[in-house]
Image (cartoon, helix red, strand yellow):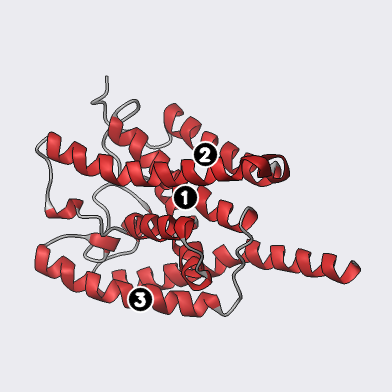
Amino acid sequence: MEMRTFELFSVEHIVTFLVFLAVCYVLVHFRKSLKPYQKGIKWTLFAILLISEISHQIWVVATNQWGVDDLPIQLCSFSTFIAMYLFLKSNNKLFHLLFFIGFIPPILSMVTPEMVYSFPHYRYIKYFIHHAAIAWAVLYFIYYEGYRVPRKAILTSFLTANLIAAPIFFINIFLDTNFFYLANPTESKTILSFFGSGVWYYINLELAALFVFFITYIPMWLLLKKEKRKSEVA
């Protein structure tokens, strides 16, 4: 049962994603009621992120499947480590980067996951709860700790992401890996599969990243606009 091949948009996939959205709604809509439980939410998310990274390494080693491509250098791992750091120490500029790489990208990864195993396999559960927790962490920082992102952070975060990606590109060449999916698209059918190959793949990757950054900022812009309007009325 646990070795079944993952089916995109199967009932279990859709239900899993709807559960993710339901938790997002609860975190945002009932934030005032949940304020007394803020510390519990904080450390629960921290624990999920930490356990996700550690348990993955344990599983691939225990099943004799560990390879250099299991090093925690994927985008989700970067987002995980940034979020964990922010749970321990405040840093506005670091949150700006997390906001852009840790919200829509994990959601897109859940919509078209690079997944082989189906529910209730460990890899399925770990993949979805890990990516979900990254996005939940972003919402937590915004609605429970008051982090905000200025418009200029779109460009600065985009440039920062490219600076991080540059050495990753050469690591991929040296280790024959595909961290950040900079070497080629995913093996499974995902959004990246439509980006072409060669130079066009990188051009489309950059354009898509910039587009995602702009789209990601829209809710933040609306939130800041709403808060400004409230402060002016008050």
Q: Name the element at disc 3.
A: helix
Q: Nearer the viewer, residue 195 or 79?
A: 79
Quadrant position of residue 82: bottom left
Residue drawn at x 47%, y 62% is 89
Q: Label 2 belongs to which residue?
A: 20
Compared with 215, 76 (above or below) is: above
The disc placed on residue 107 is 1
Q: Would you say the residues marked 1 and 2 are in contact, meaning their CB atoms lie under 8 Å apart?
A: yes
Q: CA distance from mark 1 to mark 2?
A: 9 Å
Residue drawn at x 27%, y 19% is 1
User: Callout 3, which amino acid?
Assistant: Asn
Q: CA distance from mark 2 to mark 3?
A: 29 Å
Q: Quick one: label 2 or label 3, which is nearer the N terminus?
A: 2
User: Callout 2, which amino acid?
Assistant: Phe
Provide residue 90's location: percent of width, then percent of height: 51, 65
Q: Quick one: label 1 or label 2, which is nearer the N terminus?
A: 2
The disc placed on residue 65 is none
Tell me the quadrant of the picture where the C terminus can be found.
Answer: bottom right
Q: Quick one: label 1 or label 3, which is nearer the N terminus?
A: 1
Classify residue 35 as left or right of residue 13.
right
Residue drawn at x 55%, y 63% is 216
The disc placed on residue 162 is 3
Quadrant position of residue 10: top left
